[in-house]
Amino acid sequence: MADDANDILYSHSTRSWRRSRWWHWHPQKWWIFAVGILGALTFTFLALGGPERAVPTLQATPKQIHDVTLESCSSIAKPAFAPRRVYLHAGGLRGEGIGSVLHHFKQSIVFSRLLDAEFVLASNVDSDNRYFTSKIYNGPILDPQKYAFDARNSCRIRDFIPDSERDRFTRGVCDHQPWALERARKLQHSMSRCTSVVDFNEAEITQDLNGCIMDWVKDRFHPASKFPYDPLPPFHPPKRPIRVGIHIRWGDTAKQEDLTPSALLEHKFYGSFSLRKMLSTLRDIRKLAGKSGIKLTVAMENADKRVLDLLEEKDYVLLDSRAEDDLDDMRKLSENDILLLGESSWGVLVHLIAPPGLTLVDGGAAQKFSNTTGLGRDVIYMKDYTPEKLRAALFPVQKD
């Protein structure tokens, strides 16, 4: 079979080679034909023709023909690889933080994955007081050569999925509902000729569905291959300090400047772990840590000393960087065995990119942490929390 294929390649290439060589040798000699028409073609050819030129024979090998073909094409500029199709979210982004803004293009992420396209955010307006959202979300992956926008047959996603059907279709895909998966297959087929996809939707607000995109978020922000992590061994007592990360949302304390430390303990936070629960949980973790102790990291924008003094921990790492370093702070906070988080969207994003471990959640009504345990990180809501559950989650292999 291989010989037959070689014969086909050889015979076809030889004919093409002969034709191309003939055309290359003789286009400047059309006057020969005029002389031939007058009856002197043969004599003229013998008299004026140059030295005899070699013609490829049947003894030429397919490899030789193949080499000639490659050489003849070497002058044509070709990419070393086919650029990946781009899914461009061109809808305007609101002036929100890096976590909250994700609520406005989760559907687009799901669609881009269905279409095997690279999701790209259109540039947002930079401001000294805002996160540079498109730079943060695009920065880790964009290579101008790999992701150049190909507009030869650019398609609008709303021509294939009306805006009114986006939410239901996305949820159906994420829930693996048969009707949605069948529609997804039809979508893939109908958009197979699209060289790029543009999404102008600006109406999406999706606070849940993080479980459907968490692997995408992790690959984009914090891939394990680039950020290796030493997990806590599953045996008790631990041989190293238990690493604990806390996010205290700046907005939860910024307007409470008149509160005393004791009043802060009772203050109801919107997106953070309540302080009284936080202190109680930290005591439980210290008991489990024993002699190894804990290593505490606190992320708090415009850190409030009143709050930090309540943590009963003298040695801790404080993450309070400028907006342009926000992603770096997020990564550092995620790299902890235990995370104490509220439902701040920034904190949720920390959980999504975190390595295997445990996240304790104060709240949960918005379902932001639903179905987000698929990559090895457990979630315990504080309404279900007990010290026994904490121990079982951290140390599933009991030695004492």
Image: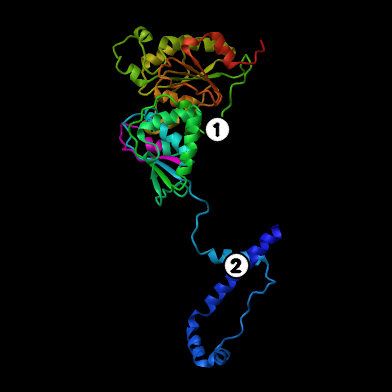
Q: Amino acid at mark 2?
A: Val
Would residue 285 appear left or right of 202 to someone viewing this image?
A: right
Residue toward you, 101 or 335: 101
Which image quadrant for residue 346?
top left
Would residue 272 appear left or right of 291 to someone viewing this image?
A: left
**Residue drawn 42% across the image and 39% down it:** 138
Count of residue discs: 2
Is residue 290 positioned above or below 43 on the image? above
What is the x, y in percent for residue 81? 52, 51
What is the x, y in percent for residue 168? 41, 28
Which stretch appears magenta?
118-136
What is the x, y in percent for residue 298? 44, 21
According to the picture, the residue beneath numbered tag 1 turns out to be 224
Would residue 21 appear left or right of 172 to someone viewing this image?
A: right
Q: Residues within 10 Å of mark 1 (few under 14, many from 20)?
A: few
According to the picture, the residue beneath numbered tag 2 turns out to be 68
